[in-house]
Amino acid sequence: MKNFSRQREAILNVLHSTDVHPTAGWVYERVRETIPNISLGTVYRNLAELTRSGEILSLSVGDGYEHYDGNSAPHAHLHCRICGSIEDAELESDSLADAARCRGFTPDTSVYIAYGVCAECNSKKEKQI
Amino acid sequence: MKNFSRQREAILNVLHSTDVHPTAGWVYERVRETIPNISLGTVYRNLAELTRSGEILSLSVGDGYEHYDGNSAPHAHLHCRICGSIEDAELESDSLADAARCRGFTPDTSVYIAYGVCAECNSKKEKQI
DNA sequence: TAATAAAATAGTAATCATTACTGATTTGGG
DNA sequence: CCCAAATCAGTAATGATTACTATTTTATTA
């Protein structure tokens, strides 16, 4: 395979070796330990492409930073309003609120966003073909 | 009651009379029809306070804008990657993916975020009391 | 291997949604 | 009516992200 540049591979490694759901800046600092002169733009570009291809997940919790997750399997995120941490939680058939409380997390609000293509845009795409 | 300024009431009205999950800029333009010299900063400040108090919902879909929702009841959001629309969907016991597909929406990724206080910060708060 | 085209990079400059700030205005209680 | 607290309009500053360009790396073909 090896379709990846050294830089992209290092970025992916950083994401796979942590569970803190880091920002682009955090990834940048970590990758610099291996590739000292990597550019921040390179980090942003590769994070965007990895997100587009579905290899990683992009997460907006509303703290002004985009967060990234090397685990692209469907799961929930528990975002602490105080310390800003983002924990993973299994998405079982039982309510997420229960799952959160089991972890000692006290949720007050929750947001579910599905990304995809809406009905209208779907029909427009079919017409084009 | 009437704890609200004229400006905040107008902002809340705009949110309650639409289902497009608008950005701050969109709200600003709509409120200006009623209060022409309202300040953009006022819109931002009131949206933040209404979010903090739980009266409205703040939604980051990752398009570079924060979106707001006058309906603070728990429900899901379907964000189209093509046209950028955000639709509401009921959050029933059955899978969200099914609910989305029923509306003609084709989901590829989904993100669940619960907001609250994590276990560690919870215990720190108890110690303070 | 050498030549060439295509893709990715480093470094820097520009963008722009959001926040911070300041001096004026409004509001409510006594 | 007066005062203090809250809110406001208007504008300046911030900072995460994106855009850009010249250079380097990678892949392809002969």
Image (cartoon, coloured by chain):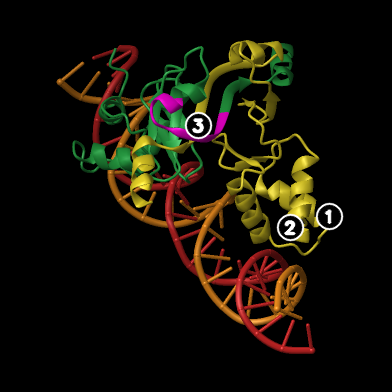
Chain colours: A green, B yellow, C orange, D red
Residue type beneath disc 3? Ala
Q: Are marks 1 and 3 on the same chain?
A: yes
Q: Residue at x 55, y 31 (%)?
A: A110
Q: Which residues are magenta?
A: A100-111
Please give the name of the residue rendered at 67% of the width and 16% of the height, measured from the top-left corner.
Answer: B105
Q: Which amino acid is tagged 2?
A: Phe
The answer to whether marks 1 and 2 sit on the same chain is yes
The amino acid sitting under disc 1 is: Glu
Q: Position of residue A103 (x, y in %)?
A: 38, 27
A129 lies above or below B31: above
Q: Which residue is mark 3?
A: B114
Q: Which residue is mark 2?
A: B4
Are there few (<14), some (14-19), or many (20+) residues within 10 Å of tag 1?
Answer: few
Residue at 34 percent of width and 41 percent of height: B123
Mark 2 vs 3: CB contact within 8 A:
no
Quadrant of the frame with the C terminus of chain A: top right
Compared to A48, does A38 lie above or below?
below
Q: Report how far apart the C-alphas of labels 2 and 3 lie in the structure.
A: 28 Å
Helix, strand or loop at disc 2? Answer: loop
Marked residue chain, label 1: B
- Pinpoint the chain carrying mark 3: B
At x 29%, y 24%, the residue is A16
Image side of residue D19 versus residue A26, left or right? right
Residue A22: where, in percent of width, then height? 35, 36
- SS of the residue under disc 3: strand
The residue that mark 1 highlights is: B33
Q: Earlier in the sequence, mark 1 or mark 2?
A: 2
- Comparing labels 1 and 2, the label whose residue is closer to the camera: 2
Q: Quadrant of residue A116?
A: top right
